[in-house]
Amino acid sequence: MSYTVFSAALELSKLLNDTQEGTATGGSTTTLLDASGMRDEPDDHYIDGTIWFISGNNANKSAVITDWAYTTGTFTFATQSGACAAGNLYACA
């Protein structure tokens, strides 16, 4: 397997952290929504963490999480080049 900085950072996070993976149910250029109910971490749990965009418009990019809202399942981060959409795969830590 050929490693990129993106894939190496994600694999390292999986080894060192409680890295979670999921599928977006929607989003925008500044948010990723996962309303599946799979995330049960409290509000703000992921602030200053990392979100990796595994597929979709932002595939192979990552961003620092600036907010996490449990009740809506919404991650917030700096503006990305493309909008997150339903079906996009992601990981977070």
Image (cartoon, rainbow, N blue to C red):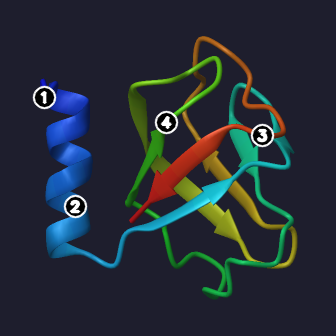
Callout 3 amino acid: Gly
Query: Which element carries disc 3, helix, strand or loop?
Result: loop
Q: Which residue is identified by label 3?
A: 87
Query: Which element carries disc 1, helix, strand or loop?
Result: loop
Q: Badge 3: few (under 14), some or many (20 or more) residues near its Cα, within 10 Å?
A: some
CA gap, disc 3 and disc 1: 24 Å
CA gap, disc 4 and disc 3: 11 Å
Q: Which residue is identified by label 4?
A: 54
Callout 1 amino acid: Tyr
| Marker disc for residue 13 | 2
Q: Residue at x 24, y 36 (%)?
A: 7
Callout 4 amino acid: Ile
| Marker disc for residue 34 | none
Q: Which residue is identified by label 1?
A: 3
Q: Nearer the viewer, mark 3 or mark 2?
A: 3
Callout 2 amino acid: Ser
Pointer 4 or 3: first along the chain: 4
CA gap, disc 1 and disc 4: 14 Å
Query: Which element carries disc 2, helix, strand or loop?
Result: helix
| Quadrant assignment for the N terminus | top left
Q: Residue at x 81, y 38 (%)?
A: 27
Query: Percent from the top left, x then y, of residue 15?
Result: 16, 70
CA gap, disc 3 and disc 2: 22 Å
Pointer 1 or 4: first along the chain: 1
Query: Percent from the top left, x then y, of residue 58?
Result: 55, 21
- Toward which corner of the image does residue 62 lie, by quadrant? top left
| Quadrant assignment for the C terminus | bottom left
